[in-house]
Image (cartoon, rainbow, N blue to C red):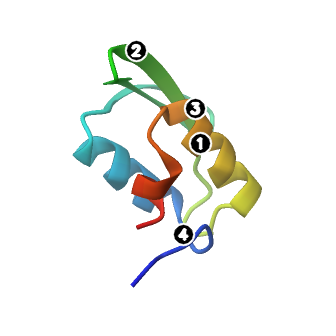
Amino acid sequence: MSRGINNWTAEDVMRFLKARGFVFNHAKGSHYFYVGRVNGKIHQVCIPFHGAKSLNPRTLKGIILQSGISKNEWLV
């Protein structure tokens, strides 16, 4: 079943990135920064953390772009 762009929490995004080799870099307030290498390039991703609240779909689209991981891989 496809998850789509809705109902992703910050925890889900962190789990997804960790599974693909990203590591926690630092936190600033309620934003967590992860760094990883995709296709030979280093990418930094900023994840806003507000408890169990779902991320706005537009925010998730920005995270997908920052990560350098294809949208198809995220939404499968």
Q: Amino acid type of disc 1?
A: Ile
x and y percentages locating residue 4 in the rendered image = 55, 72
- Which numbered disc, 2 or 4, marks the residue closer to the eye? 2
x and y percentages locating residue 38 in the rendered image = 35, 26
Towards the viewer: 72 or 25? 72
Q: Are marks 1 and 3 in contact (CB under 8 Å)?
A: yes
Q: CA distance from mark 4 to mark 1?
A: 17 Å
Residue 66, numbered circle? 3
Q: CA distance from mark 2 to mark 3?
A: 11 Å
Mark 2 or mark 3: name the one nearer the start of the chain.
2
Mark 2 or mark 4: name the one nearer the start of the chain.
2
Query: Disc 2 on helix, strand or loop?
Result: strand
Mark 4 or mark 1: name the one nearer the start of the chain.
4
Q: Quadrant of residue 36?
A: top left
Q: CA distance from mark 3 to mark 4?
A: 22 Å
Residue at 62% in and 72% down: 6
Q: Residues within 10 Å of mark 4 (few under 14, many from 20)?
A: few
- Residue 32 vs residue 54: left or right? left
Q: Residues within 10 Å of mark 1 (few under 14, many from 20)?
A: some
- Which numbered disc, 3 or 4, marks the residue closer to the eye? 3
- Which numbered disc, 2 or 3, marks the residue closer to the eye? 2
Query: Disc 3 on helix, strand or loop?
Result: helix
- Circle 4 sits on which residue? 52
In the depicted structure, whether residue 28 falls above or below residue 71: above
- Circle 1 sits on which residue? 63
In the depicted structure, whether residue 68 falls above or below residue 74: above
